[in-house]
Image (cartoon, rainbow, N blue to C red):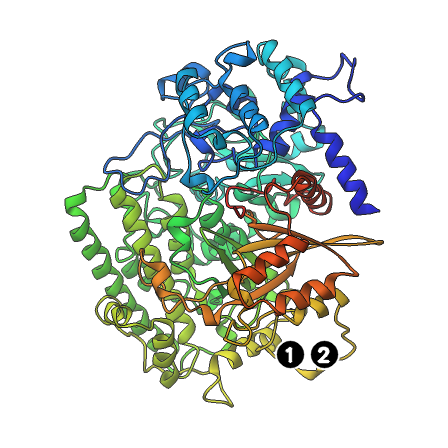
Amino acid sequence: MQFINLFIICFISVMGVTSAHAGEPDLDFYTHKIQPIFDNRCLACHSCFNAPCQLNLQNYDGFLRGANKLNVYDGTRTKAVEPSRIWVDAKTTAEWRKKAFFTVHTSEKPDENLFFRMINLRADRSDLSVTKQVHESEVCAANMKEYELLQKGSPELGMPYGLPPLTQDQLKTLQGWIEKGAPGPSREEQRKHDQVSTTTAKQIRQWESFLNQTDLKQQLISRYLYEHLFLAHIYFPQNKSEFFRLVRSRAACESGVDEIATRRPNDDPGTKKFFYCLSKFPGTMVMKTHIPYEWNEAKLARYKKVFSEGSWKVESLPSYAPGVAENPFIAFKDIPVKARYQFLLDDAQYEVSTFIKGPVCNGSMAVNSIQEQFYVFFLQPQSDNMVISPEYAEKAKDMLVLPGMWGSDVELLKTPLLMKKIVDHREAYRKLRVQELLKIRPKGYSLSDIWDGDGKNPNALLTVFRHDQNAVVLKGAVGDLSKTAFVLDYPLLERLVYNLVVNFDVFGNVSHQLMTRVYMDMIRMEAEELFLMFLPPEQRIIYRRQWYSGLLAGAKMSYIFPTVGSIEPTAVRYTDSQKTKKQFVEKVLFYRFNEQVRGSLDLLNWKNIEPPRRMMKNIVLDPYDAELRTVASIPAESKTPFARFFPDVAYITIQSAKGARVYTLIHNKEHENISWITGESLRMSPEEDTLTFKEGFWASYPNMLFVVTDNSLKDFVQKIAAIKSDKDYQALVDIYGVRRQNKNFWQSYDALNAFYKEHAPEDFGYLDLTRYDL
């Protein structure tokens, strides 16, 4: 019944005109009738930079801004382009017109209105299917003349693209709105939206007061915090669905935020006096960009404690000059390394998530340089070379050159020389690091050198899952034993953030994007190398060859990433010389971490990780988990190939009399290596593919929705196990899947979003459909 009730709630929420609202003059027309249609039918594609034609409908500002034919993700442009971040890079419609955004509200007559005609086209031609994904089929009609050509040549491009059309009630609602001139929220409604509660306002004033203290020490701390939190959707415990952005403002916060729009958060603000302020997030939240981050009394106290430890002072603030602002090891050298590292560790899941959900909302630049699934551990602060030795930190800071120092417009002809410089500096740093390690740990790293979350912080262990051009970061060891693993120390974690988030400009030219991607490749290899330092020397080269198999990959590793630290000892003791990776992971999980840090045992997916018997006493596997376990983590070999045929991500809703439960199904696609930017399809190892199941919402871009009942779950799983071909998979979809033109598609989508919002309000954001199966 709970699931049915959710369907009903969703159905009512998206109706454009309903009897419940008829004749209610106190209800704002746009807020209560138009934006709900946008939220439930349009945001699935029209949000962030991958919105078709950059038409973003997260709020009325996006509708007024209109569309633009520029492809933000153009990886071939030789010159950087001007940023077009909604709510940031222009404040008025007139300013957006100067940036080549054209209106989609071309007339108050629906037949001459570009926006309405694109929607109505889908209603007229709902019989047409699509053969391309959204990013492959973007055609931007900038006026009615271009629309007429599109209507004749590509009528399948009506909106919502390749999905069931809007209902007649919804179309009538939009038509009436267009005829009224497409008005936005009333002043009163906008005032109510901008208003915050007294309790929240008090918290905001407290935090802004902390950030805007004028002594040099606090100014440096605040700059450091801002550069790491500018992507956060900050919320306070009393309202977990009200979010704020941390911005730099020309005006004092209490006078009204006047955001300073710079390409990057570490660019010169252009004024000596500015303020760090909280600006309320103005639109509807979408999952692909949503990174919630809680501020509360305990967090403020933690910041003060972390950054107050040790006697340190600031003689002068760092400049925003190239080579300084882009290098955190130089810009923030006055802040103790331990404080910087502890700040990152405290919220490691957030920090790692920023490079995936960060400045691009489509992680293609970063994620094709990582494996489909891997664990992330962290070096204990007291074991980090930079924390231990200020002299080492001083030597290393100039070696840690980041591509961002050359800006967004890197000269193409200079790119090879600049890359050589980066590689040379990085290789010098790798050698320095091992030399320092021999001084401070002559017997090698031990288990105690892995950060244990101080016995309470679950950020100590993360799992990253890649889904095509996107990924997700989860706490705990989720999924079976990963092929590779990271150990991050402070320099690695900080460079990860600065290379892919702070310094990266999605509007930059091809050289900027290429150098950023190549440097991420270097970070990944260093993180894997640090993990290998915990294994016996004789095992390191074996794993390295497994992870980078193939002639070309071997050659690249020999010349670009030669072995360093391959003979140094490890202080970790092993009982089986052939399964050292497995032993190390199990030692960390079950002997280094306690339950609070480790989280729950993933008995649904673990097949190669074996908890000690003492931990398995009195554990009864959940019935749904037990059923799904029969097809979880099974390599797609000749006898069990079913994993190969699944898309990257699917959601499974299991209905029962007690209510619904939702699982994320993740297809882990294995690679021979991930050493190259192109030709990924040539380096796959499909026989190693597996499926991971995790209850909850762990993917922004689902490719398929499955709906089963508790009584049919066994049959669903048996049919999965029996899949031998794509034909078999399509037969499964015919029974349990919801295809994009299924008449019940929107009901399933609405129910899924409603369930998510109800059970995780702080994490909720609308799911994206730009990659839903064709």
Please name the residue that numbered disc 1 is placed on. Answer: 611
How crowded pointer 1 is (Cα within 10 Å; few <14, some 14-19, many 20+) is rated as some
The reply, left or right, for residue 294 in relation to residue 432 is: right
Q: Which mark is residue 452?
A: none
Residue 185 versus residue 510 in the image, above or below: above
| Residue 85 visible in the displayed image | no
Residue 247 visible in the current orientation: yes
Q: How far apart are marks 2 and 1 (CA)?
A: 7 Å
Label 1, secondary structure: give it.
loop
Measuring from the top left, give residue 21's x and y in whole percent.
Answer: 77, 19
Q: Name the residue under label 2.
A: 616
Tell me the residue at 24%/66% (across/down). Answer: 560
| Residue 512 drawn at (x, y percent) | 28, 44
Q: Residue at x 60, y 16 (%)?
A: 184
Q: What residue type is labelled 1?
A: Pro
User: Is residue 724 positioned above or below 744 on the image?
Assistant: below
